[in-house]
Amino acid sequence: MAKASKSRMTVEGEDEGRFVAALAAGDRAAFAEAYRRYNPPMVRLAAAILRNQASAEEVAQDAWVSILKNIGGFEGRSSLAAWIFTILTNAARSRARRDGRQVSFDDGGEGNGLAAAFDGTGHWKEMPALWEEVTPERMIAGRNLLQHVSAAIDRLPEAQRAVLILRGQQGLEAAEVCAALGISEGNMRVLLHRARHALRRELDRLMG
């Protein structure tokens, strides 16, 4: 791989076309930045599909091999992140099939109580009270709360967890999430709402 450039490569603020070109040219700084930014959520997404951390880490590494091998053919029809996560999702699904598991992200239908919890854009109508005012005590409580929320995310059904990671945490466009997971936009919205609703219930339970 080519010698790293002196300046730290970034995805944010860096023209994506130039960043992709640097990756294709073997720029080590570009790869280090891409790996830092994308590998943790790649492993989380693979773990959501496979329900096995060791397998998830292996699949993420396999996906990186494919990413670097094919980055020269990236045409920019989607964002780089969407392209990366599509490769990761396909790799995880292939691994699941080899392990004798069927993975489906189809979860149609509306969840009970969703309309009451969220507005038409999928955002909470009322934020949890803990987040309304920041105090030292609440900052400490918030750190503990995040641990519980993280555990709650890990307990979500694989379809909900995958959509939450891609749409809610990585900020991929709705169409990009649908393309990566092979689902309709309506199904994606239902899955995202159900995931957020489950987390809201967990927050309400923890805060009494």
Image (cartoon, grey):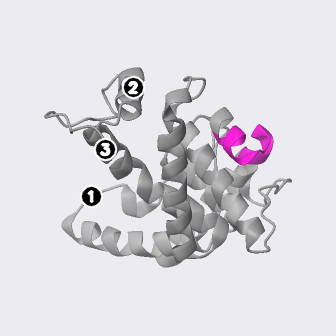
The answer to whether one can see residue 200 in this image is no
**Residue drawn at x 59%, y 76% as measured from the top left:** 52
| Residues tagged 1 and 3 counted as in contact (Cβ below 8 A) | no
Rendering quarter of residue 100:
bottom right
The spot of residue 160 in percent (x, y) is: 67, 59
Q: Which quarter shows the N terminus?
A: top left
First reached walking from the N terminus: tag 2 or tag 3: 2
**141 relative to 79, above or below:** below
Nearer mark to the viewer, of 1 and 3: 3
Nearer mark to the viewer, of 2 and 3: 2
Along the horizontal axis of the image, is 8 left or right of 51? left
The spot of residue 122 in percent (x, y) is: 63, 44
**108 relative to 95, above or below:** above
**Residue drawn at x 43%, y 61% as measured from the top left:** 129
**83 relative to 159, above or below:** above
Q: Which residue is mark 1?
A: 134
Q: Which residue is mark 2?
A: 21
Label 3 environment density (alpha carbons within 10 Å; few <14, some 14–19, many ≥20): some
Q: Secondary structure at mark 3?
A: helix
| Magenta span | 177-188
Q: Which residue is mark 3?
A: 33
Amino acid type at image mark 2: Ala
Amino acid type at image mark 3: Glu
Amino acid type at image mark 1: Val
Along the horizontal axis of the image, is 119 left or right of 142? right
